[in-house]
Image: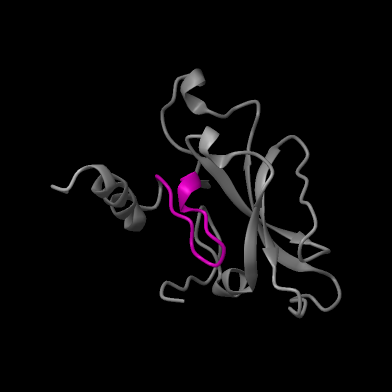
Amino acid sequence: MGDERSSWYGGCTASHILEAEERIVWKDDPGKYPYLREGVTLQLTRGGRIGMPGRKVVGYAVLRRKLPSEYGKRGWDRRVWYVNPNSDPYPAFGFTGWPIEAVWPDSVVAGRISCGPNDDDHRRAHHVDSLAITDATV
């Protein structure tokens, strides 16, 4: 992994979580949302559905099958992407900023760090990559 980080917070994910991911399962079209909230949750399975009371789960990571548990027989850390139905999207409520855990939906890829509006290191790269497709002068 080129960009390893030691802990997760608002889009920064520990490398052991990223290296364990096999694929992303989308329960809803992520392109419908201007951003998704990314989190890490301890789960009892490597690949079963993830539920979050009070939140709408849009997608979740499925881990490699022969992966030893990080917590003995207790479970695995898995990434999940969700929206809060009562507060997202923010523009309807006088948008003044992004939630700290916001990531761009098109940056979510198994085994790679997601990037979003609060991540200064990736903000410009994300937008330049998006613009480069339609504007050769970027």
Please give the name of the residue rendered at 51% of the width and 38% of the height, measured from the top-left corner.
31
Which region shows up in magenta?
Answer: 103-117
> Vertical placement of 108 versus 16: above or below?
above
Q: x, y percentage for residue 49?
A: 78, 52
Q: Nearer the viewer, residue 105 or 5?
A: 105
Q: x, y percentage for residue 127?
A: 30, 47
Please give the name of the residue rendered at 46% of the width and 45% of the height, measured from the top-left corner.
104
Instruction: Farthest residue to the right: give it.
Output: 73
Looking at the picture, the colour scheme in use is: one colour
Q: How many marks?
A: 0
Q: Nearer the viewer, residue 86 or 32?
A: 32
Q: x, y percentage for residue 15?
A: 54, 73
Residue 130 shown in magenta: no
Instruction: Farthest residue to the left: give it.
Output: 137
> Vertical placement of 105 versus 56: above or below?
below
Q: Quick check: 42 left or right of 10? A: right
Q: x, y percentage for residue 53?
A: 78, 39
> Vertical placement of 35 versus 90: above or below?
below
Q: Nearer the viewer, residue 66 or 15?
A: 66
Q: Characterize the magenta stretch by its predominant secondary structure.
A: loop
Please give the name of the residue rendered at 76% of the width and 51% of the height, measured from the top-left corner.
50
Residue 116 shown in magenta: yes
